[in-house]
Each structure stands twice: as structure tokens, then as C-alpha cells.
Image: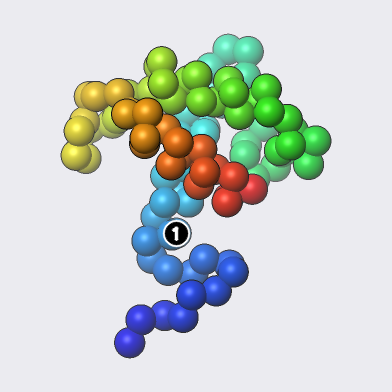
């Protein structure tokens, strides 16, 4: 039987998505000029700052390349994938 859906996001799929969003954020976070703070340690004011997420969106569209060992490795994200990633980032917050 499947696990019940709760507000915490206990499913294996959600945990995988969350981990991936945090992994990509950490890659973005290592770029010069970005915040030197892990995502889960950002202050509320930073989590509500649209400029931070605009910079993250630009990174996803312009610089991020899908890593080796997964489908579409070596390619950039599509616009639709960037939108999904940004939404998931908001859910993680």
C-alpha cells in the first residue's frame, strides 16, 4: 500500500526531487557572486527575495548542464524543466 500523502512530503519521489533541487542549488551557490549559504540555512528575507530566485533561474537557463549518468546528460534544461525546478525550490522553502 502506498504511503499517505501529507504536507511534509514523505513519498520517495518527493524526497528524490527535494534532494535534487538542493543539489542543484548547492552547485549554483558555489558560483562567484552567489550567496555563500546552503538553501536550508537561508533567512526568511532571502527566501522571499525575488532577485535570488531570478539569479537561480538565469543559472538554470544559461549555465546548468544535466550531469552524467542520468537521462539527457550533457544537455541544458528546457524552459518547462526550469519552471518545475523553480516551483520545487519554492516547495522546499
The residue to which callout 1 is attached is 15
Q: Nearer the viewer, residue 26 or 84?
A: 84
Residue 36 appears in view? no
Residue at position x 33%, y 28% in the image: 77
Q: Secondary structure at mark 1?
A: helix
Q: In this figure, which colouring scheme has been used for the structure? A: rainbow
Image quarter of residue 3: bottom left
Q: Residue at x 71, y 38 (%)?
A: 47
Quadrant of res 30: top right
Question: On the rendered image, what quadrant is the N terminus found in?
Answer: bottom left
Front residue of 27/21: it is 21
- Residue 16 point in image, percent of width and height: 39, 55
The percent position of residue 25, horizontal first and vertical second, equals: 52, 34
Residue 69: x %, y % from top left: 20, 38
The residue positioned farthest toward the right in the image shown: 45
Residue 33, above or below 14: above
Please give left or right for residue 91 compared with residue 67 in the image: right
Is 71 left or right of 25, judged from the image as shown?
A: left
Pointer 1: residues within 10 angstroms few (<14), some, or many (20+)? some
Counting labels gives 1
Residue at the extreme top? 32
Q: Residue at x 32, y 29 (%)?
A: 78
- Residue 42 appears in view: yes
Point 62% across, 39% down: residue = 39
View extreme (bottom): residue: 1
47 to the left or right of 90: right
**Image vertical order of residue 77 relative to residue 43, above or below:** above
Amino acid at each position: 500500500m502506498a504511503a499517505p500523502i501529507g504536507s511534509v512530503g514523505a513519498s520517495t519521489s518527493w524526497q528524490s526531487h527535494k534532494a535534487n533541487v538542493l543539489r542543484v542549488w548547492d552547485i549554483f551557490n558555489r558560483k562567484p557572486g552567489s550567496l555563500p549559504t546552503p538553501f536550508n540555512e537561508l533567512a526568511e528575507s532571502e527566501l522571499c527575495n525575488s532577485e535570488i530566485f531570478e539569479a537561480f533561474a538565469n543559472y538554470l537557463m544559461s549555465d546548468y548542464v544535466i550531469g552524467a549518468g542520468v537521462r539527457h546528460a550533457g544537455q541544458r534544461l528546457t524552459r518547462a524543466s526550469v519552471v518545475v525546478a523553480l516551483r520545487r525550490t519554492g516547495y522546499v522553502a
